[in-house]
Amino acid sequence: MAIYSLKQTKQPPQSQTKATLWLKENLFSSISNAALTFVALYVIYLLLPPILNWTIFDANFDLTADNQSCGREGACWSFVNANFKMFIYGFYPENELWRVNTMFGIIAALVVFGSLIKASQYRAQYIIGSFLIYPVVAFFLLYGGLGLEVVETDKWGGLTLTVVVAAVGIIASFPLGILFALGRQSEMRVVKFISVVYIEFVRGVPLITILFMASVVLPLFFSAGMDFDKLLRALIGITLFQTAYIAEVIRGGLQAIPKGQYEAADAAGLSFMQKTILIILPQALKISIPNIVGSFIALFKDTTLLLIIGLFDMLAIVGAASSNSNWLGRETEGYVFVAMVIWVILYSMSRYSKRLEVRFSTEHK
Amino acid sequence: MSELTNKEIGEKGCCDIVEISGLSKWYGDFHALKDINLKVKEGEIIVVCGPSGSGKSTLIRCVNFLEKFQEGSIVVDGTELTDDVKKIRQVRSEVSMVFQHFNLFPHLSIINNLTLAPIWVHNETKQEAREKALKLLDRVGIKDQAEKYPNQLSGGQQQRVAIARALCTSPKIMLFDEPTSALDPEMISEVLDVMVELAKEGITMLCVTHEMGFAKKVADRVIFMDEGQVIEQNTPDKFFENPESERLQLFLDQILTQ
């Protein structure tokens, strides 16, 4: 028999500096990994110089230059400057632009204020209130009425239109998606049948088809005087489309909840609604955050399809601007600019989803 | 299966709080419970044991209607369990359950796990529920963990929280579904200690467990089930000293020689 004494805990040995260790573990851990590293470096070497030359070194940053004086070697950024208002506001009347700016300003203010009251007990009310009231205010600002000059929706365009369509699609499809996800899980046969048919039908049809249906086919069913707004029809189409996808994403989350959670909620005597709202949905939505945001990102990109039914989102505006005879042949600059703007927005959404995941995590607090 | 007289069971309450008669349950074609008859007196501590697949968990899960049954009837404190949602909720508000895998709500802190049912089912105020919850946490020895989340606690602590959660609604009956089976060996006793304390306070308990020490210590009656039937029931002394049926003798030999 032997008895052993407890050993001291020690720091791990440090034979190499952190930098060389990182290189060795990540870039040169094996021969094939090292080969891939060199291939990647070579591709970067091929691509980076021409990109940098065009965007920066050969580019003309004189924001007053016109198409002729700009030169053809590099980018002509004055094109973006000259058409900036069009990219952002579309064909919105010049002296009403403050309304769009106010709308964006209120969003920023709501977000900033929301992050300040993080610890407050009124946070939930604040968020739900914002989601209910803000769309009404935003609509009033954009469309007008009650003393403001009415701006018809065919004047809306650019980033404004992109944001409006994406935001409406997101805000409206989220609660609807939850309902259809629950419907598909329901034990009531009729509810389940309707949900399955709806989800599978919409998911089996491309968004373009739905937009076409909404803008071309739907009016055929209405009498001449009853025609309603083209943008509204597109919004309904996009919301219906997005609802089906969100429903499937949330259903995935619902299925990941262990049976024991349902049983514990039942055993405690909670009603079906209480069980769903207090126990099941919070957990299911938490699991689904990455996929929900992924789906919203896809929707944001899909708004570019509005071009097909004659609405000018930010991408379509570039085409319109570069077909202006003063700026022929400059669409590349416009598309690069639009790509940057969309990338910034979508990357922020993706980072925000990461932050949400961390905040709702109860694993390691 | 012999009927026991009041005297043998001890001087526990006058009335049957759970009456199970002619209970049969099928999973598809599989006959999981076969004509079970069981009466539980108020304040009685009953331990149900038997080999796995014998239907013991299914039986106690029928008592709060987590499992539906096809034949027979269950009356809990005067309310008969049917498909009527109101009656089911009525029964569930008086019956609490502790699960093998704890089933705490991972998105809620410990204190919110405890106050959920009192607030939403029993219409208590947040303040009342919170005070009661803290007292119960104190009783199971983990008051200082109230603001943590379930995943930050050890298995034994989680199960003690689950017991406190079950007690939070002041139930008349407690159901335990193998409460120590998922625990590391060194954590079993901390949970059993809490259960022994509880048993001494006169609450009605139905426990499915293999902890024979617990059965000997506090049970009024021990029930042996096999193949969906009650094979034998007796006071703990007689149950362990003089098992009548062969199958129980075999079962006891197997688990006691471990």
Image (cartoon, helix red, strand yellow):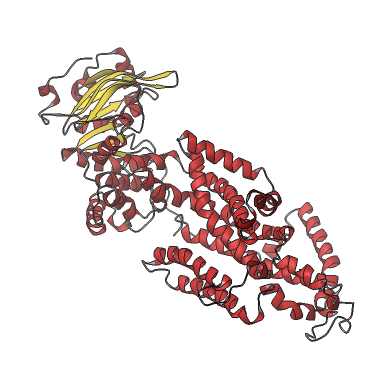
Which of these two is toward me, A360 or B72?
B72
Residue at 29% x, 42% y: name it.
B191
Residue B188, percent from left and from top: 33, 40
Dividing the image into 4 quarters, which one contains the N terminus of chain B? top left
Which of these two is toward me, B77 or A20?
B77
Q: As drawn, is A141 to the left or to the right of B36?
A: right
Residue B121, percent from left and from top: 28, 47
Residue A151, percent from left and from top: 61, 72
Which of these two is toward me, A129 or B238?
A129
The image quadrant of residue A159 is bottom right
Q: Is residue A89 above or below residue B15?
A: below
Q: Is residue A134 above or below residue B18?
A: below
Residue at 61% x, 79% y: name it.
A96
Q: As drawn, is A119 to the left or to the right of A313?
A: left
Does residue A12 appear in this view?
no
Residue at 58% x, 63% y: name it.
A167
Q: Is residue A359 above or below residue A203?
A: below
Residue A219, percent from left and from top: 66, 52
Q: Is residue A199 above or below residue B107?
A: above
Which of these two is toward me, A59 or B153?
A59
Q: As drawn, is A241 to the left or to the right of A259?
A: right
Dividing the image into 4 quarters, which one contains the C terminus of chain B? top left
Does residue A269 appear in this view?
yes
**Number of numbered discs present?**
0
